Amino acid sequence: MTRGQPAVSVLVVTHNGARHIADTIDSVIAQTFDDWELIILDDGSTDATLDIVRSFDDPRIIVLPQVHLGDWGHWRNVMARDYARGRYIAPLDHDDLWLPDKLASQFAVLEAGNAVLSCTGWASLYPDGRRVEHAPCLGGDEMSERLEIMRWGAAIMHSSLLIRRSAFLDVGGYRGDPRMSDVTLVLGLRRMSPFAPVPGVLTLWRRHRWQTSNDDETMLSAVAAMQRAIAADPQEPPEMRAAAARVARMTCARSLTDDRGRAEFRACVRANPGDVESWTWLVMSYVPRPIMLGVRALYRRRPHWVRRR
């Protein structure tokens, strides 16, 4: 039996995702919009992930077992180019969840206009059941929105995206460091057109101790490298390159919040004496590192404010 062409191709890459993958799949099946295919690529799992995925009896689910590579951006590029048949693609991390109206709301917005990407509000979902809500930091011009995204301040959440497949392919998909390739993708798409955000929380970002993003030092290093690459990109306008260079310096300094980073903080303050954030980090660099790590741990456990436009 030949499958009809779906409107949306959902792309999930998983590696040893047995803890959460069933809930993630259930959240796709529960969508009020049902014109989708779910492509799940298993990146060489050694746990029960494949057995769990194959236990779902739904013809819209396609399973692609692969050897372990560890580069989910590469695999999603392959899926989008060689397997996806929808006009739109929706990346979904293997431990995240969608609320039932997520795809329906975004599909309607993109069909009604010319935007290449739609995103939703999201909530961080903690193991104790606590939720912290967030809204996309959008609403400015291209420069300000791309700068906000480049800061890696969770301006947009990856699993909340719905993207025109043609635009995804035109921009080159995920590129560069796998930890930053979703940011690079979104930055490229923003150059094509304004985005179409859908208000309200429709995506849940599951927070747990196995996430790569929990390693602050490693992630800040990757973020700084991405920002420096933008600063050196001759295709970027001069004002964007200059802004990227400033942000990269601050990111690098934040990853070294002791004696090693103090010189960077001082340089940031000299370059922009009125920047409160630079002064704050300079002062914090004098705090002993064990105390700094303890304060950071306490900060992570407290309820966070919701950033909205």
Image (cartoon, grey):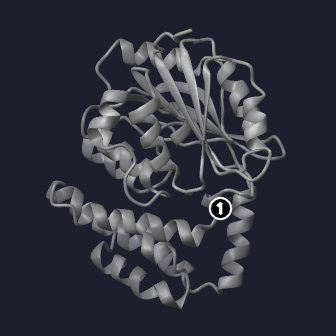
Q: Secondary structure at mark 1?
A: helix
In the image, residue 44 sits, relative to residue 105, either above or below, namely below
Q: Is residue 282 left or right of residue 232?
A: right
Q: Residue furthest front?
A: 1
**Between residues 271 and 51, which one lies in front from this camera angle?**
51
Q: Quadrant of residue 20?
A: top right
Q: Residue furthest right?
A: 128
Residue 11 at x, y percent in the picture: 53, 34
- Look at the image and tell me in which quarter the C terminus lies: top left
Residue 138 at x, y percent in the picture: 40, 37
What amino acid is found at the position of numbered circle 1 in the picture? Asn
Q: Quadrant of residue 265?
A: bottom left
Q: Which residue is mark 1?
A: 214
Task: Determine if residue 5 is in view.
Answer: yes
Question: Who's the residue at 26% across and 37% down the image?
Answer: 170
Question: Who's the residue at 56% across and 78% down the image?
Answer: 284
Q: How many marks?
A: 1
**Between residues 24 and 114, which one lies in front from this camera angle?**
24
**Between residues 6 and 275, which one lies in front from this camera angle?**
6
In the image, residue 285 sits, relative to residue 65, either above or below, namely below
Q: Residue furthest bottom?
A: 259
Residue 290 at x, y percent in the picture: 71, 83
Q: Is residue 129 left or right of residue 69?
A: right
Q: Residues within 10 Å of mark 1 (few under 14, many from 20)?
A: few
- Look at the image and tell me in which quarter the N terminus lies: top right
Q: Is residue 260 left or right of residue 15?
A: left
Question: Who's the residue at 26% across and 46% down the image?
Answer: 143
Question: Who's the residue at 65% across and 87% down the image?
Answer: 288
Residue 235 at x, y percent in the picture: 16, 54
In the image, residue 138 sits, relative to residue 68, either above or below, namely above
Task: Determine if residue 276 is in view.
Answer: no
